Amino acid sequence: MRKMIGALAAAASLWFAVPSAAQAEEWPSRPITLVVGFAAGGASDGLARILAERLQEELKVPVLVDNKPGAGTMIATNFVARSAADGYTFMVGSSGHTINPAVQKSIRYDALKDFTPVTLVASLLHVLVVKNELPVKNVAELIALAKSKPGEITYASVGAGTSTHLEAELFAAMAGIQLTHIPYKGSAPALIDLTAGRIDMMFDAVASSLPLVQGGKIRALGVVSAERSALMPDVPTIAESGLPGYEAMPWLGILGPAKLDPNIVGKLDAAIQKAISEPAVKERFAKLGADVIGYGPQKFSAFVAADLKKWADIAQRAHIQIGE
């Protein structure tokens, strides 16, 4: 994944058109809006508000958060795609930006051509958790159990076509196992059934799973990231726990409409990089289960292209299609 990002980074500069420099010299001169595709109160919304607060101080103009939830973030994404490329409307994008094109039939935007990536801000740590009754202590044992009982191991997701669904399908494909998917309408009801032993496993955000892991209600087998996280330092990666090469990175980043002035992109990226480098901001992000990344425009562009291909391949292999 990272090698693909590096290979694509050089070509990413072709995404940025070059409008007049005068526009960027005056920017910003009025309020900036960050559009969030989730309802207020969740991790993405919380991270967006932390960032908006700090950017407002840095850019000296109001930075507003506008929640437009629904349709798996596609309502917010369509809104930003149709917005003027004047540097005053941006999207707080997430993994849905690269997963939706792979699984949704009714998508009305091009995740590459209709947007200008600015900064890949953070990763949202996800973890593979299992019920206490499942007789496995690590990923290798889970894979062996699943191979001995094809299709009998159940896993929950927070909805069909979501990152937790695709992470499990990637896991099953790489491990050569069959799992049975049970979609839920959110993490909370899925975790209730996991702790009660009604389902076997799930991929979940560490922010919601960690208290249950710490309380001994469920067990954590591995984090989806390529490296261990400071948020769960004692939990190995899935790759080191029994499935070499496995990596997924639920993410949060800032994107604008297509053809944004590269000078505006550079100024906003610099302001974001300054904000997320501050220890206080990193600490607040960590409390919401996020690790700061800080990829700039070109590396973020390459990451989006690679992530789109990755999830398209998994969705095709697992025959995942949603909508008409």
Image (spheres, rainbow, N blue to C red):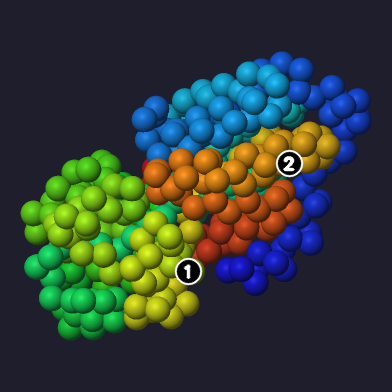
Q: What residue type is labelled 2?
A: Ala
- Lateral position of residue 291 relative to residue 63, left or right: left
Please name the residue shown 18% across and 69% down the image.
153
Q: Mark 1 points at which residue?
A: 227
Of 81 and 194, nearer the camera is 194
Q: Is residue 69 visible in the rendered structure shown here?
A: yes
Q: Which of marks 1 and 2 is nearer the N terminus?
A: 1
The answer to whether residue 125 is above or below residue 40 is below
The residue most toward the top is 30
Please name the residue shown 59% across and 43% down the image.
278
Q: Position of residue 76 (x, y in %)?
A: 52, 31
Please name the residue shown 47% across and 25% down the image.
67
Please name the residue shown 18% across and 76% down the image.
136
At label 1, counting other C-alpha atoms closer than 10 Å, the crowd grade (few under 14, some 14-19, many 20 or more) is some
The answer to whether residue 26 is above or below residue 220 is above
Give the alpha-carbon distance from disc 1 to disc 2, as whole Å.
Answer: 26 Å
Q: Which element is circle 1 on?
A: loop
Which quadrant, please, contains the C terminus? top left
The answer to whether residue 223 is above or below residue 266 is below
Quadrant of res 225: bottom left
